[in-house]
Image: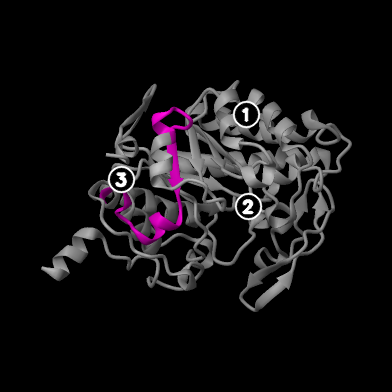
């Protein structure tokens, strides 16, 4: 069968996964008051046949919140909410829950955090707007993080990662993609620093590597993952030479025995095959995400896995609309269509009410 490689188990050291399909991190704006609740637990538990459940972008501090009703992991209440999610996933199994830590940096907004000015590598305002409870508002100018403040920002990631494991998550994914804080350090347009954390490739990758190092030291290298999107200009980030930047970053990441490297296939933006570069230079587990390029479908992903070009596939919208996606693919069954009008915010509609194949067959028999 053309899709068989998607269902092959994956083993690396003590990591044993039942298949090669991961739920991609998807912002759904349904953590009311930034605290995960029963509805969120149900959503993730429904998709627990995946290898990894990579949970939505979760702010490690109040000042890092970029969107309405996204979960945090910097308070006891938020940690207790994530514990409910982890317990539900463990009961449904066999997926391993990984919580993505996402610091918005300059695309965070004061409306979400008590009117605090956002922080960023440099005081460069992002073009565009963000949706709030009162409609869309422009991004605001961030404050450049002082050199002596960088340790505290690293500490936010570390403390959130420790809370994630205390809540029962398997690990964390550091979001260094899509124009958020760590990506802002990597990109020339958003990083104008002259203190050793900018100016050249070595400077721009430095803070990202230090965050990886700090989190890995706190929770373990095999519980720490990272996501990147080379050359992807979302959120007004621009990189002049991503191929050189990420070659240097992968060389540094290769010093750690990380849980995985998650690469968004931003090849059309970067101008080179970003997945092939990652495979060549990074020796550990590689998760590919087709992102917005749509250059490979499930059959194409299975072929690439069989060829060793990457190890797992992170699927977003198909997994959103098909909580039993591995089962459907194995059976060759039709897939539910995702309802774009319910992607962001709302209630159970378009979130936990997509039927499984078994449920559809029950209703038609």
> Which residues make up the magenta segment?
304-327
Is 6 situated above or below 44? above
Is 208 contained in the magenta span?
A: no
- Quarter containing the C terminus: bottom left
Task: Determine the residue positioned at 42% across, 72% down.
Answer: 347
**Which residue is the site of mark 2?**
61
x, y percent for residue 162: 52, 39
**Of marks 1 and 3, which one's residue comes earlier in the chain?**
3
**Alpha-carbon span between mark 1 and mark 2:** 19 Å
Secondary structure state at the residue bearing disc 1: helix
x, y percent for residue 17: 34, 34
**Which residue is the site of mark 3?**
90
Q: Quadrant of residue 152?
A: top right
Mark yes or no: residue 169 visible. Answer: no
Is 351 situated above or below 214? below
Task: Determine the residue positioned at 57% across, 27% down.
Answer: 217
Mark yes or no: residue 14 visible. Answer: yes
**Which residue is the site of mark 1?**
213
């Amino acid at each position: 069968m053309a899709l068989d490689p998607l269902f092959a188990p994956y083993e690396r050291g003590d990591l044993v996964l039942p298949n090669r399909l991961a739920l991609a991190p998807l912002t759904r704006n349904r953590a009311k008051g930034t605290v995960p609740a029963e509805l969120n637990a149900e959503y993730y538990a429904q998709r627990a046949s995946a290898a990894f459940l990579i949970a939505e972008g979760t702010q490690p501090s109040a000042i890092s919140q970029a969107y309405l009703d996204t979960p945090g992991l910097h308070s006891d209440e938020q940690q207790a909410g994530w514990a409910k999610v982890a317990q539900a996933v463990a009961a449904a199994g066999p997926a391993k829950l990984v919580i993505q830590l996402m610091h918005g940096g300059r695309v965070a907004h004061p409306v979400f955090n008590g009117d605090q000015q956002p922080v960023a590598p440099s005081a460069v305002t992002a073009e565009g707007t963000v949706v709030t409870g009162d409609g869309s508002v422009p991004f605001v100018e961030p404050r450049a993080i002082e050199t002596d403040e960088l340790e505290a920002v690293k500490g936010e990631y570390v403390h959130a990662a420790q809370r994630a494991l205390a809540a029962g998550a398997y690990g964390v994914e550091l979001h260094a993609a899509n124009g958020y804080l760590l990506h802002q350090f990597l990109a020339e347009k958003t990083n104008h620093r002259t203190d050793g954390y900018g100016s050249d490739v070595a400077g721009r990758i430095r803070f990202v590597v230090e965050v990886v190092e700090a989190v890995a030291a706190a929770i373990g290298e095999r519980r720490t993952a990272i996501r990147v999107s080379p050359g992807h200009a979302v959120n007004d980030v621009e990189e002049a030479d991503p191929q050189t930047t990420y070659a240097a970053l992968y060389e540094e990441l290769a010093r750690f025995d990380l849980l995985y490297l998650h690469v968004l296939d931003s090849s059309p933006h970067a101008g080179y095959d970003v997945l092939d570069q990652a495979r060549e230079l990074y020796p550990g587990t590689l998760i590919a995400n087709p992102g917005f390029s749509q250059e490979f479908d499930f059959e194409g992903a299975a072929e690439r896995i069989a060829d060793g070009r990457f190890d797992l596939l992170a699927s977003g919208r198909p997994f959103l609309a098909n909580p039993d996606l591995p089962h459907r693919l194995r059976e060759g069954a039709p897939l539910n269509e995702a309802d774009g009008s319910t992607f962001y915010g709302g209630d159970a509609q378009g979130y936990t009410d997509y039927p499984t194949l078994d449920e559809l067959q029950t209703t038609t028999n």
